[in-house]
Amino acid sequence: MNILYIHQYFKTPDEGGANRSYYMAKALVKQGHRVTMLTSHNESFKKTKSIEGIEVVYLPVNYSNFFGFYKRILSFLKFVKLSKNFLRKSNSYDKCIATSTPLTVGLVALWLKRKFEIPYIFEVRDLWPEAPIQMGVIKDPLLKCTLRKLESRIYKKAERIIALSPGMRNHIEKIVSDVPVDLIPNMADCKFFEKVETKNENLVVQLGVKDKFVISYFGAVGPVNDLMSLIHCAEISLDLPIRFLIMGEGNGLLALKKYVQNKQLNNVFFIPYGNKEEVKDVLNVTDACYVSFLHKPVLRTNSPNKFFDAIASGKLIITNIQGWIRGLVEKKHIGIFADSDFPAEFKEKIQPFLDSPQLLKQYQSTARFVAEQFFSREELTSHFVQVVEGKSIKQQASVRSIFSLSA
């Protein structure tokens, strides 16, 4: 098939960020499909580039994590407009895959179906508009109603829908009942991220963590990520041999750094945001990874990339997320739940792992096992290809059962 893949924020491993679309597109190419990735970049011109068999079309649409809500909306709408302009001249596709966020990529898919009768699969990475509504970013009743109608229309016109978590699937199935919804979570790249038995001494010295228990955070630093919960853990742990490393970027980073400086938290260190190789280096010296979101019901449905990178690396998981992630962490014994509302609990829950390297190693080994058994890249990209080709996903019963876990 000749497939159009629309992802406004497509990234390769060299660029950092989420690489799901890169691996899914590669899997389609491997199966003999032709894939055109329609995306954007912060340049002033359109360009086309071939990346490992994927034809990537970059449209000139500026975007930054530092943009406010309405500036982001303008960026989303500009991408829709430029995508339509491009597709008026290039539309000989058999199928379209549109992946959110933003939800507005669904406008392009709807337009393609109406104008050129090209069917589309819609992939839901985050629940929009529910997330910004619950965050209080979208308050206007008319705008809420308009966006919810758009969400419903995109779902109902899709050939199939891919959800990244059980909570997302449940939300979608409440809106649309006659479109198949397939559950394909984010993947653990067990080939790239290895379980480290002995830390690299050069990296230990370079990052200043010799003889320290290292807790790392990777990813976005914004309102939804609730990184202050990690800082509060650091505040009550000054008397413990713990170092907190934060490798992230976003509009909340400056305020976080100022808070750490003002409070003189000498156990917290910030590392420049890096690509996949640089993340791997920090993971080498890491004992536990912190995975967090604000306490909002919609954020419990998330399928965070950093969680899957962490278990692929065989790291203890510390999370404040309710829902399926907490259920998986606690019931599979791969980490601990640290409630943001009660930061003092963190100290009590992390102490056994400081006291017992054997217990830490046991949890880390189980984390790697869970990654290999249930979230392997090869397995999940195969499922994705099956969906695009119109087949039913063949999941083992053990794999299906992992999605039923909840706190």
Image (cartoon, rainbow, N blue to C red):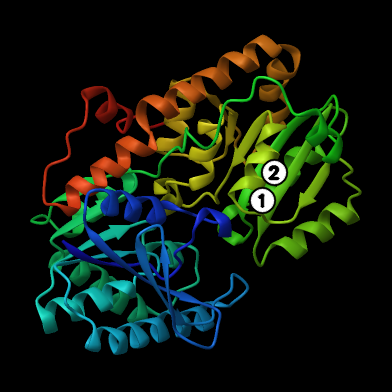
Report the quarter where the C terminus lies: top left
* Residue 245: x %, y % from top left: 75, 43
For the point 61% across and 61% down, the residue is 222
Q: Is residue 201 above or below residue 131?
A: above
For the point 14% across and 65% down, the residue is 156
Q: Which mark is residue 17?
A: none
Type of amino acid under label 2? Leu
Report the front residue among 213 and 393.
Answer: 393
For the point 73% across and 27% down, the residue is 347
Structural crowding at the residue carrying mark 2, measured as other residues with C-alpha within 10 Å and reported as few (<14), some (14–19) or many (≥20): many
For the point 13% across and 73% down, the residue is 118
Which secondary structure, mark 1? Answer: loop
* Residue 56: x %, y % from top left: 39, 70
Is residue 241 visible to us here? yes
Type of amino acid under label 1? Leu
Which secondary structure, mark 2? Answer: helix
- Kindly check if marks 1 and 2 are in contact, taking CB atoms under 8 A apart as contact: yes
For mark 1, what is the residue?
227
Report the quarter where the N terminus lies: bottom left
Q: Which mark is residue 230?
A: 2
Report the front residue among 284 and 35.
Answer: 35
Structural crowding at the residue carrying mark 1, measured as other residues with C-alpha within 10 Å and reported as few (<14), some (14–19) or many (≥20): many
Distance, label 1 to label 2, CA atoms, is: 5 Å
* Residue 296: x %, y % from top left: 48, 52
Rendering quarter of residue 132: bottom left
